[in-house]
């Protein structure tokens, strides 16, 4: 394991408070004000640690925009509607979406742009990307406007802290991180799991085997529920794309990515992106409990194809050079091919309770 400045902080936390839950480890590694990943690193693009769909192809953000425009029209084309993005990265998706919004008469003038972003460093990048756009930033959803809303989240939920339960000796225990004095590095352990955590497991979960792991993203469930409450009260819809599984299941999906390679999650905390696969079942259950209609899960490939990704690429290719055309087509394939992002990434949506159809999805899901 590689030591670094954050390691001393984690060692002190463990000495003072005892073992760290996976959730607390993630928060410290990602958001520590001096040594956290998102406060010290440039995570995006080929020079960073990972590439997201908006960085791969402009078509991604354009199709999301046209989806939002269709929902705006479906909602009666209100004079004012909030366009809200959670976890907007460098602002690339929003920039592409706003450019495409001009295609639909009236839509661009009706939307107010709001970004939910906790990182000051990422906010500065978003200001550069969206320099010509009136944007309001929010630390959390509590300050969002009381307007009909179109909410977008692309690779947002996967970065929220998870807790892990591990089945040992016939009981569920909580996986945790302790400090190994012999190696002077963090290592895995487990401790008694609180009943409040165990009760969040699905009632119909399969009979576990020794060593099975179940992940619970409490922040994700709370956030999905709060977004759904906002939409149920004020109207609109939410669209979320991320990698994960459509059905709650056992498995250890906690992972770290550094320079586009997977590394040990405990190695050099604060220097790698930490994520976990999204449990879409759990998110939609929270949204349904807050009064929203729920749609999905569909694969990203199915969703983008239903929105006409190939037709959009060929339209752009008419005004592109041969080299640009090749890039447009290969980038689109990366988004939708099953061997690329097309199957691992999923799409779900939520809407006000009276909504019974959304573009790219089948009928509402019963939960």
Image (tube, grey):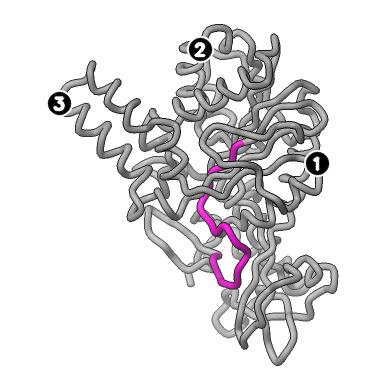
Q: Residue at point 65% right, 43% down?
A: 364
Q: Gap between marks 3 and 1, in whole Å?
A: 49 Å
Q: Residues within 10 Å of mark 1 (few under 14, many from 20)?
A: some
Which residue is disc 3 drawn over? Answer: 322
Q: Tell me, yes or no, whether the highlighted magenta stretch contains residue 249.
A: yes
Q: Residue at point 72% right, 75% down?
A: 174
Q: Earlier in the sequence, mark 2 or mark 3?
A: 2
- Measured as percent of width and height from the top left, residue 120 is found at 63, 34
Q: Gap between marks 2 and 3, in whole Å?
A: 28 Å
The answer to which image quadrant residue 135 occupies is top right
Question: 211 left or right of 225?
Answer: left
**Most extreme residue toward the bottom, as rendered?**
169
Q: Earlier in the sequence, mark 3 or mark 1?
A: 1
Q: Which of the two marks, 2 or 3, is nearer to us in this view?
A: 2
Q: Is residue 305 above or below residue 1?
A: above
Q: Is residue 245 above or below residue 151?
A: below
- Measured as percent of width and height from the top left, residue 367 is found at 72, 54
Which secondary structure lies at badge 3?
A: helix
**Which sits in the foreground, 305 or 320?**
305
**Which sits in the foreground, 227 or 36?**
227
Which residue is disc 1 drawn over? Answer: 291
- Measured as percent of width and height from the top left, residue 98 is found at 51, 18
Instruction: Write down the region rendered in magenta.
Output: 239-253
């Amino acid at each position: 394991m590689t030591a670094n400045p954050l390691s001393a902080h984690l060692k002190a936390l463990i000495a003072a408070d005892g073992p760290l839950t996976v959730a607390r480890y993630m928060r410290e590694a990602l958001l520590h004000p001096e040594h956290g990943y998102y406060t010290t690193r440039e995570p995006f693009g080929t020079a960073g640690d990972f590439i997201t769909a908006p960085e791969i192809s402009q078509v991604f953000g354009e199709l999301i925009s046209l989806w939002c425009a269709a929902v705006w029209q479906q909602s009666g084309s209100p004079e004012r509607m909030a366009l809200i993005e959670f976890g907007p990265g460098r602002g690339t998706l929003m920039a592409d979406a706003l450019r495409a919004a001009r295609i639909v008469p009236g839509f661009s003038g009706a939307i107010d742009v709001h970004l939910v972003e906790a990182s000051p460093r990422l906010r500065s990048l978003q200001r550069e990307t969206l320099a010509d756009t009136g944007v309001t930033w929010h630390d959390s959803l509590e300050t969002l406007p009381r307007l009909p809303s179109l909410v977008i989240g692309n690779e947002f939920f996967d970065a929220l802290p998870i807790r892990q339960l591990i089945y040992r000796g016939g009981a569920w225990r909580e996986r945790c991180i302790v400090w190994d004095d012999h190696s002077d590095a963090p290592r895995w352990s487990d401790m008694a799991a609180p009943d409040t955590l165990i009760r969040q497991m699905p009632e119909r979960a399969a009979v576990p085997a020794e060593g099975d792991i179940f992940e619970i993203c409490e922040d994700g469930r709370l956030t999905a529920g709060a977004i759904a409450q906002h939409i149920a009260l004020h109207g609109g819809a939410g669209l979320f794309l991320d990698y994960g599984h459509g059905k709650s299941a056992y498995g250890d999906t906690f992972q770290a990515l550094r320079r586009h390679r997977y590394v040990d999650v405990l190695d050099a905390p604060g220097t790698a992106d930490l994520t976990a696969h999204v449990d879409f079942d759990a998110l939609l259950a929270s949204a349904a409990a807050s009064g929203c209609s729920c749609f999905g899960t569909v694969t990203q490939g199915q969703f983008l194809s239903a929105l006409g990704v190939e037709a959009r690429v060929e339209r752009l290719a008419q005004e592109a050079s041969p080299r640009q055309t090749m890039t447009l087509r290969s980038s689109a394939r990366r988004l939708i091919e099953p061997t690329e992002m097309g199957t691992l990434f999923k799409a779900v949506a939520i809407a006000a309770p009276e909504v019974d159809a959304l573009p790219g999805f089948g009928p509402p899901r019963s939960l």
